[in-house]
Every structure is written in structure tokens, then in C-alpha cells.
Image (spheres, rainbow, N blue to C red):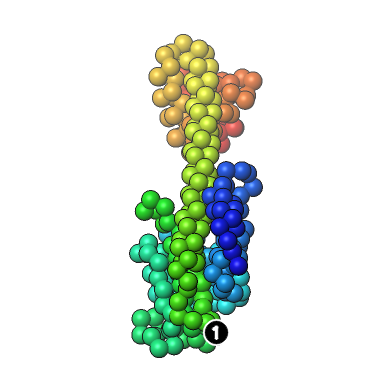
């Protein structure tokens, strides 16, 4: 049975994802277990927003959790998907007597030995990153205290996921920017070598470089790098001839 101290530690655990070595599926596995402990439920599952849209299965405390997610994914309907799309908690206490809403899912739930489901969105500031679904074997309702605590835990987990995804996004942008800068430096070096050798202005040198690259189906950066890395520079690539000529390097 959980208490306030347990909840405080769990909230910190899932909100604090600043450190390195973060793994979303491992995170989802811990969240799934913690949610089950909090609600006193044996089977829980976590789904996370996929990069290309929709939800992907991330973790479950029992094999039935994976199966029930697959049923929803196959038919495009169910409490997990409804919860994610609406951004609201979905609770159905007894699917044995209310199967008209999601017939395929209801049949799968009952067939797996469950009666109901309680799905909580992982959401922060109108940004959804997934859901936690609890599959209920007994009783139509969860204690209000547990419901409130689950929502707090889900909100903390959403903060943790968003924090990591934002960090990865900025790391990718920084890497792309650095790569673009590195490519630009190489092009500028090649342009300078060509301008000096041919006694032309830098813009004309760049146009000549670009035209030569297009003629031989190379990227401007690829040709520029070859020029910078070749002792004879522009000469060996035929760029300094009055009329650019083919070279063995360019093909």
C-alpha cells in the first residue's frame, strides 16, 4: 500500500530525467510497474506517442497488456486510443455488460479475465506523449485517492518524457547546425583557393565550383572537400583551365 512519501519519491523519479542514459522503454516499464503498485492492479500497460504519429506499445507488467494494446491498434479503437486522442481519463468499470462501444476490445478484455479498464493520459500543457492503461479484474471503480495519485504520476511522467524529447531535439539541431557550419567552412576554403589561383572574385569562384560539381554530379561540399584535401587543389580537378576539363578524380 502506498503512502504520501512513496508518491513523492515516485513523482521525483519520473519527472527528473535530466541525466544521461535515458531509455524510453525502460522508463515505460518502470512507470507501468509503479502505476500497478499505486492502484493495486496486476496488469498495466504504457503506450507512448510514436515519432510519425499514433501510439506505440512501450511496456506492460503482463503479456495480456501487450495483447490488449495490439487489439486496439488493429481495430483503431479502444480506451487507450480514446484516452490519448481526447487527453482525458477513460474509465469503464464493467465491460462484461457494456461491450457496444469497443466490441473487439471488450471481447478481448473479458477473454483475458478482466472486467474493466482505466486509462490515464500522459499529458502536459496540452501536449500528449502517451497513456497508462490499467486492466481491472475486480470491482468497477478505483478509490478516488488512487485515481488522483495516478493522474499526478502520469503528469510527472509526461514532464519526464517531454524533457528528454526536447533535449534530444535540441541535440539533433545543434549537431545539424555544426555539420552545416563545417561544410560551409570547407566550401569557403575551396572557394578561396580557387579565387587565389585564378585571380577571380570569390563569387565567381563559387559559381565555377558549383557548375563543375553539377557537371560531374557531385555535391558542392564533396568537390570542395576533394579540392582542399588535394595538394594541387583546383588544378588537379581541371577547374583552373580556361575551359574546365574532365579529370580522373571527378569521373
Q: Is residue 183 visible?
A: no
Q: In which quarter of the image is residue 96?
A: bottom left
- Give me the residue at 40% from left, 19% from top: 203
Residue in front for this viewpoint, 51 or 233: 51
208 is higher (above) or lower (below) than 119: above
Q: Residues within 10 Å of mark 1 (few under 14, many from 20)?
A: some
Give the image location of residue 187, x and y in percent. 50, 25
Looking at the rendering, in which quadrant would you find the N terminus? bottom right
- Give me the residue at 57% from left, 69% from top: 36
249 is higher (above) or lower (below) than 206: below
Residue in front for this viewpoint, 159 or 63: 159
Q: In this view, does 63 lie to the left or right of 55?
A: right
Residue in front for this viewpoint, 111 or 137: 137
38 is higher (above) or lower (below) than 13: below
Q: Is residue 134 visible?
A: yes
- Give me the residue at 51% from left, 35% from top: 174
Looking at the rendering, in which quadrant would you find the C terminus? top right
Kindly identify which residue carries mark 1.
112
Give the image location of residue 93, x and y in percent. 43, 79
Count all numbered tags in the image, as a single digit: 1
Give the image location of residue 164, x and y in percent. 53, 47
Give the image location of residue 135, x and y in percent. 51, 76
117 is higher (above) or lower (below) than 16: below
- Give me the residue at 46% from left, 30% from top: 212
Looking at the rendered structure, the secondary structure element under dot 1 is loop
Residue in front for this viewpoint, 124 or 107: 124
Amino acid at each position: 500500500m502506498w503512502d504520501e512519501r512513496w508518491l513523492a519519491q515516485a513523482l521525483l523519479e519520473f519527472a527528473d530525467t535530466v541525466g544521461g542514459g535515458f531509455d524510453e522503454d525502460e522508463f515505460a516499464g518502470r512507470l507501468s510497474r509503479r502505476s500497478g503498485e499505486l492502484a493495486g492492479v496486476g496488469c498495466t500497460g504504457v503506450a507512448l506517442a510514436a515519432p510519425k504519429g499514433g501510439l506505440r506499445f512501450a511496456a506492460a507488467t503482463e503479456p495480456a497488456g501487450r495483447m490488449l494494446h495490439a487489439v486496439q491498434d488493429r481495430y483503431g479503437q479502444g480506451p487507450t486510443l480514446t484516452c490519448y486522442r481526447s487527453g482525458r481519463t477513460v474509465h469503464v468499470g464493467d465491460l462484461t455488460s457494456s461491450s457496444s462501444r469497443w466490441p473487439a476490445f471488450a471481447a478481448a478484455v473479458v477473454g483475458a479475465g478482466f472486467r474493466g479498464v482505466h486509462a490515464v493520459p500522459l499529458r502536459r500543457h496540452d501536449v500528449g506523449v502517451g497513456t497508462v492503461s490499467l486492466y481491472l479484474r475486480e470491482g468497477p471503480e478505483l478509490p478516488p485517492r488512487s485515481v488522483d495519485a495516478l493522474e499526478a504520476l502520469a503528469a510527472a511522467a509526461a514532464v519526464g518524457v517531454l524533457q528528454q524529447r526536447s533535449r534530444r531535439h535540441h541535440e539533433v539541431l545543434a549537431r545539424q547546425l555544426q555539420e552545416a557550419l563545417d561544410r560551409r567552412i570547407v566550401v569557403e576554403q575551396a572557394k578561396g583557393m580557387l579565387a587565389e589561383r585564378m585571380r577571380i572574385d570569390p563569387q565567381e569562384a563559387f559559381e565555377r565550383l558549383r557548375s563543375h560539381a553539377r557537371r560531374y554530379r557531385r555535391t558542392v561540399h564533396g568537390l570542395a572537400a576533394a579540392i582542399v584535401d588535394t595538394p594541387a587543389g583546383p588544378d588537379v580537378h581541371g577547374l583552373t583551365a580556361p575551359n574546365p576539363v574532365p579529370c580522373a578524380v571527378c569521373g
